[in-house]
Image: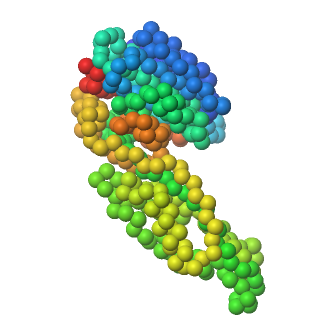
């Protein structure tokens, strides 16, 4: 299948990749998916919120409900002159499919669309329901996409039982890693007040850099938790520090630093905020702090979904998969609020967001086969 001629997954992936759907644009990708699945009995609901297009596709109404989730938006291309081929003209070279969205994540969307179509054709009387939740706001601010669709589903009394998010999770080979959770992300901007003055008269000034240095050391060296079976310990990183006028003879009047905490389910947002504030207060700093919650952690312990997916990966590829919670945030954090079992699984992620993003052509049909086998494991 290296040339891809007989691959419906490759054909649909390429069709999606020709659409320059840089976030939050969808460029009618979702309409294409709705058309692809209409004959298989999937009913489409288009759910636009502001400038974001969202799609809810569902076949049947019975439980259990298995949802495939993904996004049609992609990140910007970066400098076009650095690409070896047009990022929106999918190109095959040396067995690899090049173009923006090849790995993140139009191949996954194509694979689970084809998998659903083939599964329904083979098992039209399957139990339960199959749905797809597609957004064009995953690579952007993520405020008018999956989070609002989940609110809509909750209002309608629709609760998924299982969800597979098609994020690229594999590392060295297809199927070696699936994500059964993600860490939370909590950021803050802290302004430390001092008193500006001449460096020759330090007794008439208060240097905020000197004042906050011990607190920064304590924050950076604190053990926030020890993690748990699924998560590594929570981490704290200072990402920016700004102070001073640019002159060498002026004590600055304030200092500002930014930090981010990636936290596990062993900590909570409130506990982390309280501990940070306690450290700042213990050093008698006069501060203001602005918090930004990028996402709460979510975790799906080993269960029906992870077993069904792991078994499918083993049957199709022979690979024994590993559960992982590493990496950044994803839309899984929103879906986990309405769905008890959320797993992320997709192709190799080595080139996502990069110039010359690509995917192995020969991994496309196995990816769809894994999704199809997972459907069989859960809905037959």
Report the front residue among 273 and 232.
Answer: 273
Q: Where is residue 110 in the image (x, y as percent from the top left)?
A: 45, 23
Q: Which residue lies furthest to the top in this view?
A: 39
Q: Quadrant of the N terminus?
A: top left
Q: Can residue 155 be seen in this view?
A: yes
93 versus 342 height, above or below: above
The image shows residue 2 at horizontal and vertical percentages of 39, 22
| Residue occupying image coordinates x 36% and y 25% | 65
Quadrant in the rendering for residue 69? top left
Which of the pair 193/338 is nearer the observer? 338
Q: Which quadrant, please, contains the C terminus?
A: top left
220 vs 11: above or below: below
In the image, taking residue 304 as reference, residue 117 lies left or right, namely right
Q: Position of residue 278 (x, y in %)?
A: 50, 72
Q: Is residue 103 left or right of residue 74?
A: left
Relative to 140, 60 lies left or right = left
Q: Position of residue 365 (x, y in %)?
A: 36, 22
Which quadrant of the figure has residue 320? top left
Colouring scheme, one of rainbow, by chain, secondary structure, one colour: rainbow
- Write the residue at 45% across / 28% down: 157
| Residue under the point 49% across and 65% down | 274
Task: Say whether residue 369 is visible.
Answer: no
Report the number of discs. Answer: 0
Between 25 and 350, which is closer to the camera in this rendering?
A: 25
Residue in front for this viewpoint, 171 or 36: 36
- Residue at the image point whose x is 51% and y is 55% from the top: 186
């Amino acid at each position: 299948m290296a040339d891809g001629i007989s691959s419906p997954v490759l054909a649909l992936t390429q069709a999606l990749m020709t659409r320059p759907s840089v976030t939050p644009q969808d460029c009618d990708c979702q309409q294409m998916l709705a058309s692809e699945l209409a004959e298989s009995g999937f009913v489409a609901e288009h759910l636009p919120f502001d400038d974001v297009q969202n799609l809810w596709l569902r076949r049947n109404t019975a439980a259990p409900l298995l949802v495939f989730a993904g996004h049609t938006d992609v990140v910007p291309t970066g400098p076009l002159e650095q690409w070896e081929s047009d990022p929106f003209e999918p190109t095959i070279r040396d067995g690899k499919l090049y173009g923006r969205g090849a790995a993140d994540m139009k191949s996954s969307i194509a694979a689970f669309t084809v998998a659903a179509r083939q599964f329904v054709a083979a098992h039209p009387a399957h139990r339960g329901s199959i749905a797809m939740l597609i957004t064009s706001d995953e690579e952007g601010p993520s405020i008018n996409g999956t989070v609002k669709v989940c609110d809509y589903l909750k209002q309608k009394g629709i609760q998924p039982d299982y969800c597979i998010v098609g994020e690229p999770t594999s590392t060295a080979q297809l199927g070696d890693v699936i994500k059964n959770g993600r860490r939370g992300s909590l950021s803050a901007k802290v302004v430390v007040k001092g008193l500006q003055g001449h460096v020759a008269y330090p007794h008439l000034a208060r240097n905020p850099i000197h004042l906050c240095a011990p607190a920064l050391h304590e924050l950076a060296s604190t053990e926030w938790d020890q993690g748990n079976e699924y998560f590594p310990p929570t981490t704290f990183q200072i990402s920016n520090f700004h102070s001073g006028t640019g002159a060498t003879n002026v004590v600055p009047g304030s200092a500002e630093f930014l930090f981010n905490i990636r936290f596990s389910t062993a900590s909570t947002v409130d506990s982390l905020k309280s501990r940070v504030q306690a450290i700042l207060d213990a050093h008698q700093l006069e501060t203001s702090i602005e918090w930004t919650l990028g996402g709460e952690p979510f975790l799906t312990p080993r269960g029906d979904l992870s077993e069904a997916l792991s078994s499918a990966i083993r049957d199709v590829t022979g690979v024994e998969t590993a559960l992982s919670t590493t990496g950044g945030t994803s839309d899984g954090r929103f879906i986990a609020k309405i769905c008890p079992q959320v797993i992320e699984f997709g192709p190799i992620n080595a080139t996502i967001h990069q110039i010359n993003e690509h995917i192995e052509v020969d991994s496309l049909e196995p990816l769809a086969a894994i999704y199809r086998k997972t459907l069989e494991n859960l809905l037959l």
